[in-house]
Amino acid sequence: MTTLWVLFIFLNFDLLLKTGQCTKTSGQVLSITPNTQEQVEILKNVSTQFETGLWQPVSPHNIKELTQVHLYVPGNSSETVKNLLQRHNITYEVMLPNADEIIKMQMRNDSGDPRSGSTFYYRYHTLEDIYDWINRTANDYPDKVKAILVGSSYEKRPLYALKLSLNNRPNKKAMWIDCGIHAREWISPAFCLFFVHYLLSFYNVNTEITQILDNMDFYVLPVMNPDGYKYTWTNSRMWRKNRSPQNGTSCIGVDLNRNFDANWCTTGASPDPCNEIYCGPFPESEPESQAVANFLRSHKESIQIYLSIHSYSQMLIIPFSCTTDEAENHSELYEMVKTAADQIRRYYRNTYTYGAGAQIIYLAPGGSDDWAYNLGIKYSFTFELQDRGRYGFLLPPSHIQGACNEALLAVKTIAMKVMEKPQAATGSRQAGPAA
């Protein structure tokens, strides 16, 4: 470690001698492929001992030989990390050389007023802007939209879900969509805003949207992790977890998508509060996950489809992620996401991987989608939106429209498929393995 710091100081002093001034280096995202187990161990150490952010996989435990790793390296560690990789013959390429500039671009916003035009939905917005948008939307459509206080975060920020109901037909089923469970995945809340706006704008205009809304209500939670999302705007753009303090450590936060009672804290989650996939002290220990779980429990008879929006990697995921066992209706779910992926490829020429989470990614227990499935919501999905790593969590605003259109098409495809089913009963049984 001492040798590395000496090397770091020497490199920067040499740069100072050459230029006559201190030059600030932008953060970068590296794509790294370890070829041996020794290189895997070095890469694990790099990802934990330096001020880096592991993007893919999310935990050092999942770094494997011959598998691509995406690592965010801040400017003050860039040369040190790259020299260390070179010294151990670990090949890498700079995927994103100007991460800091991209972050500034993401935060640039000329309009906080949704009535200023459709461009509002092709920008990223602060938490305050999103709360304002929720209030405006509920006020502008009082007969169609209702803001429901589902609960509050650790730092006492409200968790508002919008209920969209376009008619009073009895015994209507519903779809739940939550966004922003992981703070740094900004495209996720952007989709929830876009989606609500699209439904309200195209009802009685688009045939499929009209048919869906005539037969189904929607609950949309734009930001499930408001404390973490706020923190990504004010302190650390790469923050993932919520912001609850943990006993006996200075490390902050729980991974809310490891905090549900679905094979909780088994392989694929961590009991270490300093880990990015920390499962929390017990299932539903966090007010955010508990609030969502309580709402779904109290509405399980009507909620027919559960969907959680994430990024990145372009995947349409079905249960299970908490076990390698297949869901009872695996074939049915698989056919739905296959059809949705085919539609995306046909209309937008973009490729989405699809299948059970444990099969196409890795084990990830404690997820909201598996928990919802076990509750009895048998049409349960997680979407990972754009992209595949070119920009990762720093997807530029110019890509928001494309990402949202693809996800919208997948939602429409799945909703129409579910509506075709002769039976819509949910909540009647415990599905899948015991959680």
Image: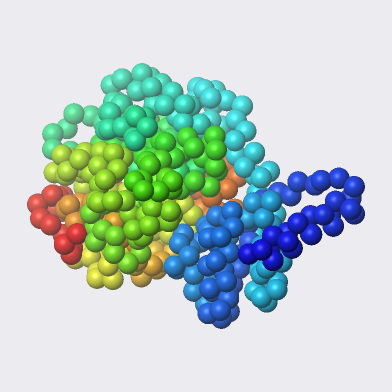
Residue 206 visible to the viewer: no
Q: Residue at x 49, y 37 (%)?
A: 231
Q: Residue at x 69, y 57 (%)?
A: 78
The location of residue 337, given as percent across then percent down, is 35, 60
Q: Residue at x 53, y 47 (%)?
A: 238
Residue extending farthest to the bottom is 36
- The quadrant of the image that shows the N terminus is bottom right
The location of residue 80, given as percent across then percent down, is 70, 61
Towards the viewer: 209 or 81 = 81
| Res. 29 image quadrant | bottom right
The location of residue 108, given as percent across then percent down, is 62, 33
Residue extending farthest to the left is 428
Q: How is the image coloured?
A: rainbow
Residue 255 visible to the viewer: yes
Q: Residue at x 70, y 71 (%)?
A: 86
Left-right relation of 372 to 310: left
Left-right relation of 371 to 192: left
| Res. 46 image quadrant | bottom right
Q: How many marks?
A: 0
The location of residue 338, given as percent across then percent down, is 37, 63
- The quadrant of the image that shows the C terminus is bottom left
Left-right relation of 42 to 150: right
In the picture shown, does residue 88 fall above or below 55? below
In the picture shown, does residue 128 fall above or below 332? above
